[in-house]
Amino acid sequence: MKVFLNPGHSPNGEPDPGAVNSYTHLRECDVAKSICDLVEQYLTAAGVEVVGNLQSDNLFHNSDYNQPCVVDEANDSGADVFVSVHCNAFDERAHGTEVEVYQAGGASSLLAGFIQAQIVEALGTTDRGVKERPRLIVLSHTTMPAVLVETAFIDEEHDEELLRTRQDYFARAIARGITDYENAQ
C-alpha cells in the first residue's frame, strides 16, 4: 500500500501556522509536521510505502503561493490513501479526537474508523467520531480514499499537553490505524 501524508498548514507557519495555543504558543503546523514525520518512519518500518509527506497551504495551482499543490501532488503520487493531520481548536473547552471524511461509507470511512479507534485507545482522548466534511478540498478533490485527522484540541489545556508531549503516541496510533486498514482490505 502507498500512503500520502499531509501535515496541516504552511511549512514553518508562513503564511499560515493554523491554530495556535494563546498561552503556550504551540502551533498546529509544528505539531502536524512532527506527527507526520514520525508516522512516515513507523509506516516505512512496517513495510508501507510513503509516497509523499507534503506540508503546504496550496490546495490548488495558485500563483500566490510559493508552495507545491497538495491535491495535485497527492493525485499524481499513485497513493492508495491520503491522510492529512491537523489539530482542532474552538473555545478552549472543546476536547477530543475526530477524523473527517468527504462522505460517510466506503473506504474513507473505514480508514477513518481505524485511525479514530487507535488514537482514542492509545491516548484516552474523547471520541468525537468520524464526521462528514464535504467542503474540505483535500477530501473532495483527492482521487483516493482520504481522511483528515483532527488529533486533539490545541486550545484546550489537557489536549494541548497531549499534543505537546505525546506526539509519538499520536504518530504510532495513526500508523497502526493505517496498517489496520491495509490488513482489512
Image: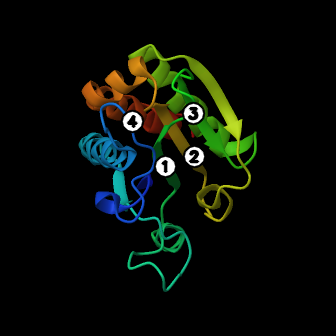
Label 1 belongs to which residue? 83
Q: Please, is residue 10 above or below residue 72 in the view?
A: above
Single out the mark in the foreground, 3 or 2.
Answer: 3
Looking at the image, which residue is at 54% across and 20% down? 93
Label 3 and label 2: CA atoms lie apart by 20 Å
What residue is at 35 percent from the left and 64 percent from the top?
14
What is the spatial separation of the Cα atoms under label 3 and label 4, in whole angstroms?
A: 11 Å
Instruction: Provide residue 23's location: percent of width, then percent of height.
Output: 34, 31
Q: Which residue is mark 3?
A: 90
Query: Which circle's residue, 3 or 2, is located before the other in the chain?
Result: 3
Task: Answer few, some or many: residues within 10 Å of disc 3's Cα (few below 14, many 20 plus, some between 14 and 19).
Answer: few
- Give the foreground label among 1 and 3: 3
Q: Nearer the viewer, mark 4 or mark 2?
A: 4
Q: Which residue is mark 2?
A: 147
| Disc 2 crowd, CA 10 A, few/some/many (<14, 14-19, 20+) | many
Circle on res. 34 = none
Residue 50 point in image, percent of width and height: 35, 55
* Residue bearing the label numbered 4: 21
Q: Nearer the viewer, mark 1 or mark 4?
A: 4
